[in-house]
Image: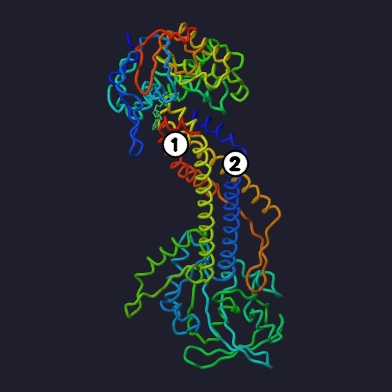
Amino acid sequence: MDIVTFDNVSKIYQMGQVAVAALQEVTFAIPKGAFTALIGPSGSGKTTALNLIGCLDSPTRGEVTVAGQAVSRLDRRSGAEFRGRHLGFVFQDFNLLPVLTVYENVEYPLLMIRDQPKAQRRPAVERVLAAVGMADQAQKYPAQLSGGQKQRVAVARALVGTPDLVLADEPTANLDSHTAFLVIELMKQMRDAFGTTFVFSTHDPRIMEHAELTFRMEDGRLTNNGAAPPEEAIR
Amino acid sequence: MKILRLAFKNLLRYKRRTLLTGLLIGVGVVAVIVFVGLSDAFKGAITGQITDSMLSHLQVHRKGYTASIDNLPLDRMLPAKAYAKLADMLAGDPAVEAFSPRIKFGAMLSNYAQTTNVRLNGVDPAREQAAAPLLASRIKDRTRDDAILAPGEVVLPEILAKGMDLKAGDTVVLVANNKDGSVNGMTFVVAGMVESLMGPGGRDGYMHIDDAAALLRMAETEISEVAVRVKHSEDVDAVAGRLQETLAPMKNQAGQPMFEVHTWKQLSPFFNVVRMIDLMTLGVQTILIAVVLISVLNVMMMSVYERVREIGTLAAMGTTPGRIMGLFVAEGFSLGLVSALSGAIVGIGILWVLNLSGVEVAFGGAGQVFTLEPAVSLGQVASAALIVVGISVLASLQPAAKAARLVPVDALRHI
Ligand SMILES: Nc1ncnc2c1ncn2[C@@H]1O[C@H](COP(=O)(O)OP(=O)(O)OP(=O)(O)O)[C@@H](O)[C@H]1O
Ligand SMILES: [Mg+2]
């Protein structure tokens, strides 16, 4: 079963007189549980595609479905509710809330979005914190963590609500290559442990090689349709 | 609750800014509480001074008397029968504490060397004491301990006595024109000097009502005014209204209403001072509202602006716009609440200290000094705090709505 499908999706940004086609008639599908990379040069449309999957933006034309639901025309509120139920996000800059501890950051989606009671939240938070290896840092604040540790916490936060799909736009761009490798490994382990589909974008060939499914983009078009990692990455 | 907790944590993020704003609001609340406490005490003191030493709470005259009260007209008196009816009614009213009939008239005062004009009240000393309990304290060199005066005695206005070099115990002659225009004179012993007060009747002397009737050669005693003291000063308007209603049907032969009723508010120019104080209180409260509005609006706008990316993150994760709005409103609410509460506590503390040390205020030309007892009711503190919290919430609505309207994609790109 496909967790994400794009059917002839175009996204055109109108900048005054100039129309920028960030995506042009893109059609593809991501099967459930796939560890997926979007690759391509800068400006090729990776972020745009991830935003459409993440219901953060609407396509100009075409249909996007996520987890079996058409999401192209959700309003703000239903979009938020859909994201809260089905999606997790990992950001390039970690984007943890500085006023909350590691534990509270991970707890946030359950507390403020899912409105779960404490008895339900506690085991879920502890489980993902243990899974990403941050259980012993639970009471620290983000400012006390290294970049890699922050991204681990971010991964835990994305996973705590057991979403169908975790989206990560360049999750390793702000990490050194070794830490980047560890974070990507961790995401893969999480996919194995929880069966969650991961879709991430990257420039880094060493990161791409960990993907099982790769979509290469160029000028808003797909240049391969869901292939194994490119040779340049394998080498 | 969880929203409030998160709001608190976010407020503490910018400690200095939050502290400064809270301080500003808190100082505003302190100012309002102290001002209200002091001004209420001052209001209470001056109204007490006016009503308790001279006017009493309300006065009943024959219709048309007050309009020409400066002439002390002897042809606009209440006849004995009318007064008797009125007295019955007042005696039967449970809200009335005391009432005192007065004969007001003008006379010539002579110390055998000089002559001058004097305005006098003929009163029953005991009744007058009950209707204006502070009168006794205004009388200097009083010759009697038990009463303000006795028959055959007169209490003179202090400035007049000074000018004529009169002292307690001296004998004076009072000459008065009666209603028909004929003249009568009698001698009296000076039983004390009464301090001046501002306002009508503030420079009048006192004598016994029977002496006044005799001096004016009244066949039966007619009354110029009846001063009425009510048990609870807040009831003045209610009692006045009730009196007016029951007295309205009583007509004279010409079919005109017989009586007129005035409260001290209508009689004393000091009611304007009281109104002015109320206006100032309103002004201070308006300033507080403006301070709260502007400072909370400012803090919340900065807060939203600085956290655009964070708001984008929350929204991307699935926090609904309503929740985001709630988060920021809760921040304004907490800021207002904590500031208002600490301001209220400090304000009450300051009033308490003022009470302990005593605030002395000079009032009136005579240099009377009385000690204020500043106090605020819990209701006043609560309403000040409530206004502050309400305005804080109001001020955070616009920034909060702005936060809720942010588009996640744009917000996340924000540097
Ligand atoms: N909000 C926007 N308004 C106008 N043009 C935009 C907007 N967002 C993206 N674009 C344009 O759309 C195209 C695709 O951008 P996108 O951000 O998806 O590329 P990307 O592959 O993520 O690039 P990078 O690797 O640099 O992140 C680019 O030409 C970009 O300039
Ligand atoms: Mg990008």
Asked if B26 appears above or below A141 in the picture, the reply is below
| Distance (Cα) linking label 1 and label 2 | 20 Å
Q: Nearer the viewer, residue B55 or B144?
A: B55
User: In terms of secondary structure, where does tag 2 sit?
Assistant: helix
Q: Nearer the viewer, residue A48 or B95?
A: A48
Question: What residue is shown with label 1?
Answer: B403
Seen at 47% across and 68% down, the residue is: B263
Q: Position of residue B370 (x, y in %)?
A: 66, 64
How crowded is the residue under tag 1: few (<14 C-alpha within 10 Å), some, or many (20+)?
many
Q: Quadrant of ligand 2?
A: top left
Q: Do the residues marked 1 and 2 share a common chain?
A: yes
Q: Position of residue B97 (x, y in %)?
A: 52, 62
- Left or right: B167 as drawn, with respect to B402: right
Query: Which chain is home to disc 1?
Result: B
How crowded is the residue under tag 2: few (<14 C-alpha within 10 Å), some, or many (20+)?
few
Query: Which chain is home to disc 2?
Result: B
Q: Amino acid at mark 2?
A: Arg
Asked if A142 appears above or below B404 in the picture, the reply is above
Q: Position of residue B120 (x, y in %)?
A: 57, 81
- Left or right: B131 as drawn, with respect to A67: right
User: In terms of secondary structure, where does tag 1 sit?
Assistant: helix
Asked if A192 appears above or below B339 in the picture, the reply is above
Asked if A29 appears above or below A115 in the picture, the reply is above
Q: Nearer the viewer, residue A153 or B388?
A: A153
Q: Amino acid at mark 1?
A: Ala
Question: What residue is shown with label 2?
Answer: B17
